């Protein structure tokens, strides 16, 4: 405590703090304008990127609504993403529980060393499990995006067939 009070009463410390504070405030004032310009250009780029993704999604939905076989392939691809998502979530919940099981049942250590990470520190294990959870959430988002795109294409194809009786969906089998 005496060392801290000695530091606080020293003029060098106050001089350093005041100079550092002035430098940070001046740099912050200039950086604020630069950061504002950067973020505004980033938001316009983001808006353009979102718009182009919407257009691409609409084109894909139209294309899938006309090609029944490709729509089925896209449904199967979304199911593969769903299975990957389920397995990632399962691993993110099972591995920590299994790792904790070793503390109570040491005979399970062989299995845990094969699939778990007992040699890593606990903080690294938690980071890994958190990364698995985030990957599972990303796969969930990808699955929902694909699935709803397929559903939109299926509904659009049904509407198109009802409104135009002469419309025949393109099938890869019939094209050959």
Image (cartoon, rainbow, N blue to C red):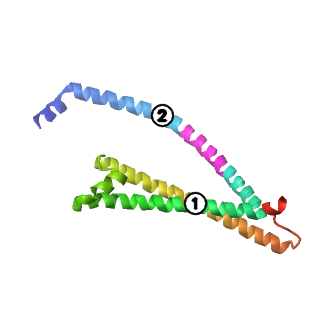
Q: Which residues are magenta?
A: 36-50
Q: Nearer the viewer, residue 101 or 168?
A: 101
Q: Quadrant of residue 23?
A: top left
**Residue farthest toward the top in the current orientation of the protein:** 12
The number of numbered badges drawn on the structure is 2
Q: Position of residue 63 (x, y in %)?
A: 76, 58
Asked if residue 45 lies in the magenta stretch, the reply is yes
Q: Is residue 142 shown left or right of residue 89?
A: right
Please identify the quadrant where the C terminus is shown.
bottom right
Q: Are marks 1 and 2 in contact (CB under 8 Å)?
A: no
At a point 49% along the width and 62% down the height, the residue shown is 86
Secondary structure mostly seen in magenta is helix
At a point 76% along the width and 60% down the height, the residue shown is 62
Q: Position of residue 105 (x, y in %)?
A: 23, 62
Q: Is residue 96 shown left or right of residue 63?
A: left
- Residue of label 1: 80
Residue 31 badge: 2
Q: Nearer the viewer, residue 27 or 111?
A: 111
Query: In terms of sequence position, does the residue under pointer 1 or pointer 2 come before the other?
Result: 2
Q: Position of residue 92 (x, y in %)?
A: 40, 58
Residue 171 appears in the picture as rendered: no
């Amino acid at each position: 405590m005496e060392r801290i009070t000695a530091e606080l009463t020293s003029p060098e410390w106050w001089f350093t703090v005041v100079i550092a504070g002035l430098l940070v405030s001046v740099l912050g004032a200039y950086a604020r304008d630069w950061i504002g310009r950067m973020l505004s250009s980033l938001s316009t780029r983001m808006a353009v990127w979102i718009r182009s993704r919407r257009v691409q999604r609409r084109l894909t939905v139209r294309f899938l609504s006309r090609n029944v076989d490709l729509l089925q392939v896209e449904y199967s691809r979304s199911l593969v993403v769903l299975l990957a998502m389920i397995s990632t979530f399962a691993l993110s919940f099972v591995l920590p529980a299994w790792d904790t099981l070793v503390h109570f049942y040491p005979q399970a250590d062989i299995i845990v060393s094969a699939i778990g990470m007992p040699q890593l520190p606990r903080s690294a294990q938690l980071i890994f499990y958190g990364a698995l959870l985030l990957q599972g959430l990303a796969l969930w988002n990808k699955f929902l995006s694909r699935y709803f795109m397929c559903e939109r294409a299926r509904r659009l194809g049904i509407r198109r067939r009802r409104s135009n009786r002469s419309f025949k969906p393109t099938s890869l089998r019939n094209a050959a």
